Amino acid sequence: MTKKKIIKNQTNYLPHSIWPVHLLNKLERDGVNYLGITLYELMLRAGNEIYKHISFNWPDAKHWLFLCGKGNNGGDGYIAARIAKISGKKVTLVSVNEQISSKETQFAYNAWLSIDGKIVGPNQIWPDKVDIIIDALLGTGINRIPNKIYSILIEKANKHYAPILSVDIPSGLFASNGNVPGMAIFASHTLSFIALKPGQITGRARDYIGKLYYVDLGLKSFLLQKKPPILRYDSSFLSYWFKPRKPTSHKGDNGRLLIIGGDMGMVGAIFMTSEAALRTGSGLVKLLTYQANILPIITARPEIMIDDITKDSVLKKSLSWADVIVIGPGLGNKDLAIDILRKISISNKPMLWDADALGFLATINNKKNNRIITPHPGEASVLLNSNINEIENDRLYAAKNLVNKYGGVIVLKGAGTIIADEKGNIAIADVGNAGMGSGGMGDVLSGIIASLAGQGFTLFNAACTGCVVHGAAADELTNNFGKRGLLATDLFKILWKFINPDMKNKRNKMKTLYKQKIN
């Protein structure tokens, strides 16, 4: 009796590095030179990983349908198809019938033909029953709308009932920025090779990418020697960012945060920012708002200090007292608000500008290195005199332009929030979900980031850490309760887990021990 071949489990480990598309070819070539192999041997590894991935994740799939393009992405598909056919799978391979663009892909194409592999044209009818579709049409290099042949195949695959595995990137999704100007594959899984790409993490990626997997193709030791141009941050970093406090620390050590805003009818925004700062560990939080807001706030949260925004002497004293300043949540655009913004714009203290403050910033020439700004795409379009579609079509480009124009640290919010600064540091927060599309989420984020800045984090690290804490907390809530109906204030219930990751780990260990005892 022959033993069944065991396919090892693929973990969903993702690296903390992202490489721009224009550097990928050099990275790949340097990698094969480092290993002393050829590009075709690397393609063989990729094809083998495709086969392993499908065999593990869809073990009952008997009929595999491959869609192969003319480039190296198609070459990976030809290799995987060959392995599948040799292994006894029923394989249908659809080719776009265009001239092959690389010698490696030509080798792979010939290897497929050498085992009597058949080619189905793009206009031919597909078999009735297909268990898995492998999208190897377009790779990471496309920068235009797929032509008619590719678009027809993409649409046909999307309408099919079978799950789809995309090789490296769903065809039609731009790997450089997550833009989708035409048709694109809605993948069930995406298997990324060598490096993660920006378009897999930000922009419209989450609509198309499905579950993202990564394989380094044996280049791990080589890649560890390289400094990645873009960092990918998720909740696994929290234990590195948050260190235990000294036993002798006191409230004065943990940051004096001044928050200014809360126009009439907008008191909720400034309250959520203040509450988020306290829940993130600020030592002292003071609000400046309108007189009518003082009693409701102090009743709801007596730990907050509060004073009248209309008193100039109070403003001067408060600015002198504060370690970090937040302005914008619910601020409004009254003459008083504009006057306060002008005064604060010349301060050299660390500060965060959000919401209404960003509208004012767009009207003045004020570039500063001591400021974090946190625009959503609509606010970013005003700051750059652009439109929302242009911002969303290339979020990395927009973030860099915001840094060049306004300085400091930029937090471009959205799916795959981008953090960038004047030193050239760029990070993408790979957390968060569609449940966060509700009022007040940005106000909470501002409080979290500013609190961390007051606790000694650099502005860039405060922004990165704050975005991860914010998104990871929302992810836990939606994983437990679903995405619809999530409120910004719901995050306050569990923020402690993410700003005290050591306590979260201890609690998980205690749960495990308890389960073992009762069993």
Image (cartoon, helix red, strand yellow):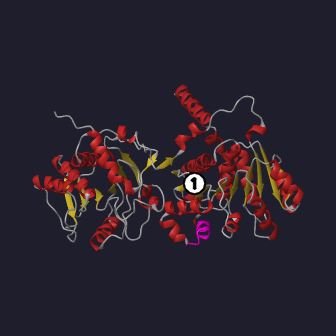
How many numbered circles does the render carry? 1
Tell me if residue 138 is in the magenta stretch. Answer: no
Q: At 78% across and 48% down in the image, what residue appears?
A: 322
- Secondary structure that dominates the magenta span: helix
In the image, residue 299 sits, relative to residue 311, either above or below, namely: above
Q: x, y (%) of residue 372?
A: 65, 55
Residue type indicated by callout 1? Glu
Q: Position of residue 348 (x, y in %)?
A: 73, 52
Q: Nearer the viewer, residue 511 or 74?
A: 74
SS for callout 1? loop
Residue at (89%, 57%) from the top-left corner?
313
Q: In the rendering, at what x and y percent does residue 157 appear?
A: 31, 65
Residue 58 in view: no
Graded by Cα atoms within 10 Å as few (under 14), some (14 to 19) or many (20 or more), the crowding at tag 1 reads some
Identity of the residue drawn at 36% across and 57% down: 169
Where residue 219 appears, as percent x and y from the top left, is: 33, 41
Residue 384 drawn in magenta? yes
Q: What are the residue bounds of the magenta stretch?
A: 378-386
Residue drawn at (15%, 54%) of the image:
112
Report the front residue among 271 and 381.
381
> In which quarter of the view is residue 141 placed?
bottom left
Residue 272 falls in image quadrant: bottom right
Task: Please tell me which residue lies in front, 127 or 393.
Answer: 393
Q: What quarter of the picture does the N terminus occupy? A: top left
In the image, residue 485 above or below residue 277? below
Position of 154 with respect to 471 (left or right) is left
Q: Is residue 412 left or right of residue 316?
A: left
**Residue 17 relative to residue 325: left or right:** left
According to the picture, the residue beneath numbered tag 1 turns out to be 422
